Image (cartoon, rainbow, N blue to C red):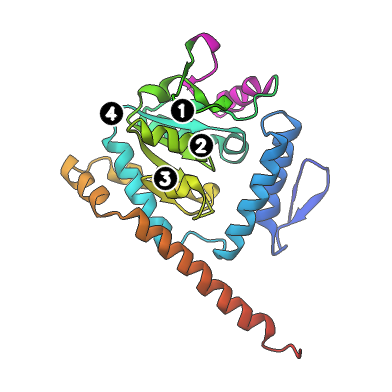
Amino acid sequence: MSQENGNNSTIPRSHPRYLSLKYRHKIIEGMKNLVVAEAGLIAHGRGEAFDYILGERTNEIAREAIKAASALLLLAKKPVISVNGNTAALVPKEIVELSKILKAPLEINLFYKKKGRIEAIKKVLEEAGALDIRGIHEEKLVEIEGLDSNRRLVESIKDADVVMVPLEDGDRTEALKKLGKKIIAIDLNPLSRTALWADITIVDNIVRAIPLMNTLIQKLKNSTKSELEEIVRRFDNKKCIQASLELIKNYLDVQKEKAFKNVKI
């Protein structure tokens, strides 16, 4: 069995890097269709490297963060899900499903505003069933104080109480925190500014984290406010990041032993 990719070649399902290659080609196709910026390929490659040394699986630390993030989103009065090109290319259906479950808008917010990119991302989200897309009308955008990049221009994010920023978004995360927002980040790099500034950092691949979040939010929807607040209260982001770093160290130690076990140097 194999899967067709955008280059008209095939990826055998037996290939040990099958999933990694599958999502890599989604990013490449996204770039060809203006959804992903050229720099998005670099960002994806960096994420692949971190995912590799995390064992390419959702560990218990990440699951704990996903649970806390789900509870915080359910508690939010004005949650907003920020969407960039890589998110739209990798998990369009899943991010739209999350938006519908929470009744939260998806807001397109880009660092690289190449002509046609917003329209291309909007099309991808609409094809995935999105009903509420923000950040697409210039006249509705306002500026975030203390931010100079294109990401300073926002719509619903300005009034949100909780903002989810899938994938790295350091400058804006810092600026939003200073405005009193609660930030949920999905970032495979536990030492990025996004990860360190966020209230809840999910150190996991977005292609695994969002589907798990959708499932968990459905399970938590009937929880009481106090139960959800207790989940958030118990979560310690600093300890979560430290545990993720320890996991990386341990994984590398194990792989080092495996790699040189039968090799003479």
Gap in angstroms between the C-alphas marked 2 and 4: 24 Å
Residue 182 at x, y = what percent? 34, 37
Marks 4 and 2: in contact by CB < 8 Å?
no
Gap in angstroms between the C-alphas marked 3 and 1: 15 Å
Gap in angstroms between the C-alphas marked 3 and 2: 10 Å
Confirm whether residue 186 shows in the render: no
Is residue 134 highlighted in magenta? Answer: yes
Amino acid at pointer 3 = Trp
The structure residue drawn at horizontal position 56% and vertical position 23%, both measured from the top left corner, is 126
Which disc, if any, is residue 171? 2
Amino acid at pointer 4 = Lys
Is residue 148 highlighted in magenta? Answer: no
The tag earlier along the polypeptide, 2 or 4, is 4
Residue that carries the numbered disc 3 in the rendered image: 197
Front residue of 175/120: it is 175
Confirm whether residue 153 shows in the render: yes
Q: Looking at this rendering, what residue extends furthest in the right direction? A: 8
Residue that carries the numbered disc 1 in the rendered image: 146
The tag earlier along the polypeptide, 1 or 4, is 4
Q: Is residue 196 above or below residue 259?
A: above
Amino acid at pointer 1 = Gly
Q: Is residue 81 left or right of residue 4?
A: left
Q: Secondary structure at mark 3?
A: helix
Gap in angstroms between the C-alphas marked 1 and 4: 25 Å
Q: Secondary structure at mark 4?
A: loop
Gap in angstroms between the C-alphas marked 3 and 4: 21 Å
The stretch in magenta equals 116-139
State which quadrant residue 102 falls in: top left
Which disc, if any, is residue 77? 4
